[in-house]
Amino acid sequence: MLAGRRVLLVIGGGIAAYKSLDLIRRLRERGAAVVPVLTRAAEEFVTPLSVGALAGQKVYRALFDLTDEAEMGHIQLSRTADLVVVAPATADLMAKMAGGQADDLASTLLLATDKRVLIAPAMNVRMWNHPATQRNLATLAADGILRVGPNDGDMACGEYGPGRMAEPLEIVAAIEAALGQGPLAGRHVLLTSGPTHEPIDPVRYIANRSSGAQGAALGAALAALGARVTFVTGPAAVPPPAGVTVVKVETAAQMLTAVQAALPADAAVFAAAVADWRVANAAASKMKKDGSGRAPALVFAENPDILATVSRLVEGRPRLVVGFAAETDDVLANATAKRLRKGCDWIVANDVRPATGIMGGVENEVTLVTADGAETWPRLAKDEVARRLAARIAGALA
Ligand code: CTP
């Protein structure tokens, strides 16, 4: 519930602005007051009349409205909210925020506010992937700006990929989390993600094909439910989610150290694809061909099993320990055995045969194995798998 909370909603100029009308409705249903601010471009997509009617509030528009400046200056407007939400956050608005520009009411409010800011980006996939936008995104994350989405999907411009604004209910969940309201508020969840890199010499390493996409999606979903998330990640292909504490590691040994340092936690989820072996005789200098035609003999040593180590903790074991199982054969039988062998509470198993397209892809098909048995979920986007799993974790910790 958001009773008595005040959200300053900046609506940017993008086609997703229509979803912001529904967002206003959902927020008001939950008791929040919504103060809307429209950029000039937003008025091309939604009208001040419809926004004002849904918000039941005056709509703030241009910066130099002298009446507003007399009644309530833009500085004060930016301070009276509990949270500032930008939805849709266009590439242009993000660039202005990252650059600290203040040339209209929306950007001035965003520069002047002393409240937390949550953005829901929405733009064409190429605009999203453009290095300039990704640079701005990194700047905004470093500035502590919270983010929800964007999601993958079909876009109004006919392309497919990341750039679709998060759905209104996802934005509501992120707002609740930002205001400390979600079902995981006050809980600490430790999450590992990505592959590990095990050095052979200073320039070569052994790795695996994990992109870290499922772990990143899960981090975002847990944070959206209000959890404080420690995200211990190997060198992943996808960026870490917003709103989590990121701890970057390379090797399995470093991952174990980072995990132990992050405990205690209410739940620990091990989505990382940890290398089972490291090179015991890794060279300190780059290995050279010696002209004999003989390949160097690598000696392997087994890595510590992080999941099993945490599952078996006698003191300080998280209440819920969840492992993942990437299998290519007998998924259910292997996952069921793995749950018992590792001592964790749940195993999220998936079939990673190349033909499934799951490893490195945007979808996942998982079977959740618990002490009560196994349930197979339909093939879903990794974001959706993450949301379902986060909701189950919230249920288990309730
Ligand atoms: N895991 C871990 N530390 C390791 C290896 C695995 O924490 N050194 C975790 C993974 O994060 C995952 C689970 O254990 O949650 C399953 O890992 P997997 O590699 O599939 O299992 P293995 O123990 O390697 O079993 P097998 O090689 O027989 O498939």
Image (cartoon, rainbow, N blue to C red):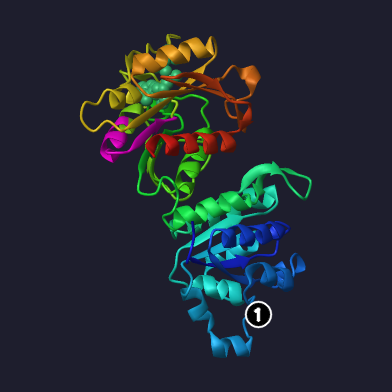
Answer above or below: position of 53 versus 369: below
Q: Mark yes or no: residue 59 visible.
A: yes
In this view, the residue in front, 327 or 256, is 327
Residue 371 position, x and y percent, is 41, 19
The span shown in magenta is: 256-271
In this view, the residue in front, 212 or 74, is 74
Residue at 57% across, 25% down:
359
Answer above or below: position of 291 versus 46: above
Answer above or below: position of 380 versus 96: above
Horizontal side of residue 146 vs 40, given as left or right? left
Give the image quadrant in which the ligand numbered 1 is located.
Answer: top left
Residue 24 position, x and y percent, is 62, 62
Residue at 47% across, 34% down:
392
In this view, the residue in front, 27 or 220, is 27
Q: Is residue 263 magenta?
A: yes
Q: Which residue does the numbered mark 1 point to in the structure image?
A: 62
Label 1 residue SS: loop
Residue 110 position, x and y percent, is 52, 70
Q: Is residue 52 magenta?
A: no
Task: Give the class, few, some or many, for how many residues have Cα within 10 Å of label 1's Cα (few <14, many ≥20).
Answer: some
Residue 54 position, x and y percent, is 67, 67
> Farthest right residue?
158
